[in-house]
């Protein structure tokens, strides 16, 4: 897959000289700041918020009746049911609660590729920072995971504005490196997801789809709502190269090949299309949300479009 290789004539992947706070792009926040990112699944929450909880309480949407027991509040008795049955039943409601979200950023070697724009990793970092800021604004607990070898960097979810700086500091210190064992990296995060909530994955998706699918199915089976945001460079989708070139691996040191792009373009594009279709089918098939973005797109516009689409569909 091309993204794991770099055309030698292209710009060398380098990380932009931003400070940690500058990953929260004010232009993006202006576009998405009035939107919401809600869970479509039942979450396990502790604080009052916007999301449906498994906890039964005394407010919000009606859930069920149960028989009165000593100690229950009299005001919760449903007198209409009593009039019909001559038995005491109390009403239970589904509370709305805060969400616990994890924003996971793929930082394996292929994410370091940049064509004519910023690197995929830089684009992912800006998206991750802005989504984390949006979730904190909703009073939700947010954590961050950076997925790469030799170990995943994990910032546990917290629900306070000061926590944003801890997440941004982790993003700031990352460079794209290592092989793309994305499924294994996600598996390493799963034991730390202690409450059902939202799992947002920012990746180029150019990994072993069997391993990635197995990992995401475990995340979904544990009750988490899954969002996969795929980030690609336009060159990866178009393969516009015309002349003999040297392509160097971004994940394995010392691997380099020379070839004529014209001779492999059709085969490359066919394989890429097949890979993309499988990735979308995988994500949608497990009940998740998928969106593709490219590094030449305005991040605020594409995130705004995705959030509006998701809200229109009820999440």
Image (cartoon, rainbow, N blue to C red):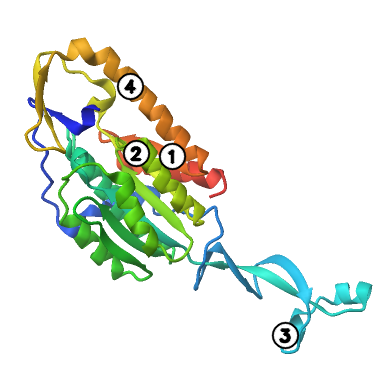
| CA–CA distance in space, label 3 to label 2 | 50 Å
Front residue of 282 and 93: 282
Residue under the image location 75 percent in, 83 percent down: 75
Q: Residues within 10 Å of mark 3 (few under 14, many from 20)?
A: few
Rendering quarter of residue 253: top left
For numbered disc 2, what is the local secondary structure? strand
Q: Is residue 16 visible?
A: yes
Q: Nearer the viewer, mark 4 or mark 1?
A: 4
Picture disc at residue 230: 2
Picture disc at residue 37: none
Picture disc at residue 72: 3
Image quarter where the N terminus lies is top left
Q: Is residue 115 visible?
A: no
Q: Are marks 1 and 2 in contact (CB under 8 Å)?
A: yes
* Of the image marks 4 and 2, the number of the one nearer the N terminus: 2
Q: Which residue is mark 1?
A: 290
User: Does residue 2 sit above or below 197 in this rendering?
Assistant: above
Residue under the image location 14 percent in, 30 percent down: 6
| CA–CA distance in space, label 4 to label 2 | 17 Å
* Of the image marks 3 and 2, the number of the one nearer the N terminus: 3
Residue 280: percent from left, percent from top: 44, 34
Q: Residues within 10 Å of mark 2 (few under 14, many from 20)?
A: many
| CA–CA distance in space, label 3 to label 1 | 45 Å
């Amino acid at each position: 897959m091309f993204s794991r290789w770099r055309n030698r004539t292209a710009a060398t992947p380098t990380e932009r000289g931003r400070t940690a706070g500058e990953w929260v792009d004010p232009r993006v926040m202006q576009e998405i700041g009035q939107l919401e990112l809600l869970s479509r699944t039942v979450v396990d929450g502790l604080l009052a918020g916007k999301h449906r909880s498994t906890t039964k309480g005394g407010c919000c949407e009606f859930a069920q009746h149960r028989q009165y027991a000593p100690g229950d509040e009299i005001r919760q008795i449903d007198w209409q049911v009593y009039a019909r049955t001559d038995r005491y039943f109390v009403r239970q409601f589904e509370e709305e609660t805060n969400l616990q979200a994890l924003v996971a950023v793929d930082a394996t070697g292929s994410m370091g590729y940049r064509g004519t724009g910023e690197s995929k990793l830089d684009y992912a970092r800006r998206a991750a920072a802005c989504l984390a800021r949006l979730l904190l604004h909703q009073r939700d607990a947010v954590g961050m995971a950076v997925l790469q070898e030799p170990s995943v960097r994990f910032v546990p979810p917290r629900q306070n504005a000061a926590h944003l700086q801890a997440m941004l500091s982790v993003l700031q210190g990352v460079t794209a490196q290592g092989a793309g064992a994305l499924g294994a990296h996600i598996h390493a995060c799963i034991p730390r997801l202690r409450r059902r909530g939202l799992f947002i994955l920012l990746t180029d998706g150019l990994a072993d789809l069997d391993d990635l699918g197995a990992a995401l199915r475990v995340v979904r089976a544990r009750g988490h709502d899954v969002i996969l945001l795929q980030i690609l460079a336009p060159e990866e989708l178009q393969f516009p190269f015309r002349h003999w070139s040297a392509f160097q691996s971004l994940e394995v040191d010392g691997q380099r090949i020379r070839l004529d792009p014209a001779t492999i373009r059709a085969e490359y594009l066919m394989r890429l299309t097949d890979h993309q279709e499988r990735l979308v089918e995988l994500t949608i098939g497990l009940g998740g949300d998928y969106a593709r973005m490219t590094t030449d797109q305005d991040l605020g516009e594409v995130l705004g479009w995705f959030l509006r689409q998701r809200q229109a569909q009820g999440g």
